[in-house]
Each structure stands twice: as structure tokens, then as C-alpha cells.
Image (spheres, grey):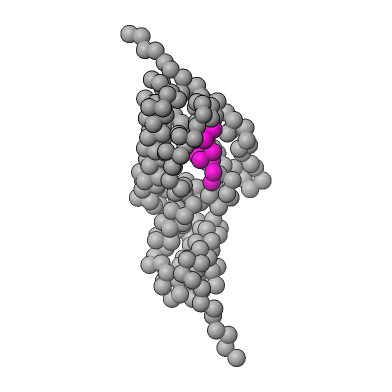
Amino acid sequence: MRVQRRRLPPAVRVGQILDAALQAFSHAGYAGTRMDDIALQAGLSKGGLYAHSSSKEAVFEALLARHLDPAPLDVDAVVDGALSPRHLAERIVNHLYASLADTATVSTMRLLLAESGRVPHLAARWRRETAGARQAEISQVLQRARARGLCGDCLALEHPWLLLAPVIHTIVMSALMGPQERVNLAARRRGHVALIQRLLEPVSYTH
């Protein structure tokens, strides 16, 4: 008796495919993984996989988008709900670290770091569309914070990328660690909040 494959909603099936792809890429790397491998891991025929994704590169790109594109920052909510510079710093850090406890995010970043030479256009796209977008959002937060009196002329306004540097370092270090190693996220969050507080302090420029 032939068992009929259960038809799943497209969003659920795509999620299964990306879960399978992450396992396959993590095991064999980008170059060593075939669409056949992803299909087998996902419990699909090769034709079933191609019905959802046109190529291995498209699967990899979707994987990056799934795990490395954080939710957009609600600038108004972050700033208008802040009661003090420290509170603002805490709210920024909470958003930036929201996805770092997810092991799939760390595994995907490890893949991106390892395979950036093979798929440089995808790495460049992540830098441009994800890291660049986060910096633009932080700039908007700081401009609104200044208008609300939560900061004045400060280093953060001049160099908004400094607010992102600790979380990028945390992501890279997490990706480079072995399976039994863990970054102390609580300590890093505390240090990041303290750093942002200092960066929000007024500075005077002397010539």
C-alpha cells in the first residue's frame, strides 16, 4: 500500500527545508552540500525541493535571511519608552541581543564566516542590508534621543557604529567557539550597556 505524503503549508515546508539545509551545510560546508543532500535531510524528493527553491545558492540566501536579519528596530518605541540614558542603553542592548541565544543564529553566522570566500556576494549583501540597516536604525535612535534630551553632542552621535561593535564581536566569537564553549552573554550585555552609557555622555571638543 502506497503511503501518500502529507501536504504541508508552504511556510511550514520551507521552514523544514531551511532546518535541513542548516544541518547539511554545517556538516559538509557549502561546496560539499548538494541539493540531493538537503532534500534527503528534509524528507523530500529532489523535485519537491526544487518546487520550493531554485538552487543551492537560493537556499543558502534564504537561510541567511531567516537567521541573520533581526526584526526591525521600533525607533519610536525604544526612545519614547526610555526614562534615562541608562534605560535607553538597556533597551538598545535588549534589541541587539534578542537573537544571540538562538543556536541556529550562531550556526548560520559560522557558516557565513566560513563560506564568505565562496559566496562573497551574499556576504556583501549581509554587510550592506543587515549590518548597514542596523547602523541606520541606531542613528535614528540617537537623533530621536537627542531631540528628547536623553543625550547631547556625544561620541555615539558621531560614530553610531560603536554601539554595534560589541554585539558583532559577540557574534563572531560565538561562531568561532566549539560546541562545548559558550559566550557569557549576561556579562557582555552588562558591559555593552555600560559602554553605551559612556558613549551617550556629552563631550567637548578643544582645538
Figure check: 25 above or below 8: above
Left or right of 13: which side holds 136? left
Quick one: 169 or 118, which is closer to the camera?
Answer: 169
Q: At 46% across and 19% down in the image, what residue appears?
A: 201
Where is residue 194? Give x, y as percent: 55, 25
Q: Position of residue 76 (x, y in %)?
A: 42, 38
Residue 97 in the magenta stretch? The answer is yes
**Residue at point 39% right, 31% down?**
144
* Quadrant in the picture for residue 152: top left
- Residue 58, given in percent of the width and then of the height, sits at 39, 61
Residue 98's place in the image compared with 24, above or below, is above
Location of residue 160 by image quarter: top left
Within the magenta stretch, is there residue 33? no
Question: In terms of secondary structure, what is the magenta stretch mainly?
Answer: helix
Residue at image position (38%, 51%) is: 122
Give the residue drawn at x 38%, y 42%. 133
Whether residue 160 can be seen here: no
127 versus 141 height, above or below: below
Quadrant assignment for the C terminus: top left
Q: Nearer the viewer, residue 10 or 126?
A: 10
Q: Is residue 53 visible?
A: yes
Q: How many marks?
A: 0
Quadrant assignment for the N terminus: bottom right
**Part of the protein shown in magenta:** 90-99
Whole-percent x, y for residue 60 in the image: 44, 58
